[in-house]
Image: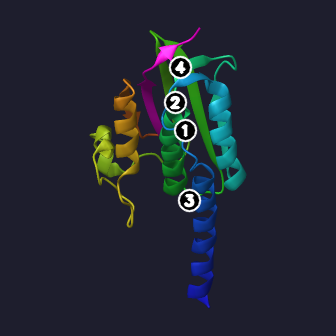
Amino acid sequence: PYLLEQNNKVSKKLVVFMDTMLSEIEKKQFEPKSQNVYDVLERITSTWMRDYSWIDIKLIIETSTEYLISEDILQVIFDNLILNSVQQNDSRSKLDIEINVKISTGLLMFDYRDYGKGLDKKYKDDPMKILEVHESTRKNGHGLGMWIINNTITVSGGEIYEIEGDGGFRMSFSIGGNYNG
């Protein structure tokens, strides 16, 4: 009975995750177009908060922020960041996440932060190591999420500036494209 109960819990989590990911499967072909960045991030984060009621995501961004970018780039980056936060903190009953966005020197600047357990001690001396392919501390982790994030940011013309892991997880980065303001 215990194994069946555990399997049922895992199955329910998997179904919620797959529903979330499959609802986003319609590709926009990474085609850049003028986007209201707030609206795009609101759609992404509201889906996560709907499916994971124990997380709260706060967007800190001017609601009129326009930028020439593919919605898929934001989707790939933030789905992977939020998924990592959820997976690393799945034993918690509440997780707060903040996404701070501004435009500077023609780039979209992001400060992503969760107030969970932070980085594993394995990464304390070299937090950027989590960006390497197959790098993971999770027993069954594949180590591709942060690698995908890094590659997506780099291909967009952006850069990861800093990763911190004390008092939660924090990553500051930019995404390239064109400012429409």
Q: Nearer the viewer, mark 2 or mark 3?
A: 2
Q: Amino acid at mark 1?
A: Lys
Q: CA distance from mark 2 to mark 1?
A: 8 Å
Which quadrant, please, contains the N terminus? Answer: bottom right
Which quadrant, please, contains the C terminus? Answer: top right
- The residue that label 4 is drawn on is 68
Q: Nearer the viewer, mark 4 or mark 3?
A: 4
Q: Amino acid at mark 2?
A: Ser
Q: CA distance from mark 1 to mark 3?
A: 31 Å
Is 175 magenta? The answer is yes
Q: CA distance from mark 4 to mark 2?
A: 7 Å
SS at badge 1: loop
SS at badge 2: loop
Q: Amino acid at mark 3?
A: Asp
Evaluate if marks 2 and 3 touch, with contact meaning CB atoms under 8 Å apart: no
- The residue that label 3 is drawn on is 90
Q: Which residues are magenta?
A: 169-181
Q: Nearer the viewer, mark 4 or mark 1?
A: 1
What number is the disc on residue 51?
Answer: none
Instruction: Please provide percent x and percent y for residue 43.
Output: 67, 38
What number is the disc on residue 28?
Answer: 1
Specify few, some or many for label 1: CA neighbours under 10 Å numbering under 14, 14-19, or 20 or more. few
What number is the disc on residue 70?
Answer: 2
Specify few, some or many for label 2: CA neighbours under 10 Å numbering under 14, 14-19, or 20 or more. some
Q: CA distance from mark 4 to mark 3?
A: 35 Å
Q: Earlier in the sequence, mark 2 or mark 1?
A: 1
Q: Is residue 127 above or below residue 173?
A: below
Evaluate if marks 2 and 1 touch, with contact meaning CB atoms under 8 Å apart: yes
Q: Which one is nearer the viewer's eye here, 60 or 15?
A: 15
Q: Residue at x 56, y 59 (%)?
A: 90
Magenta-drawn stretch, dominant element (helix, strand or loop): strand
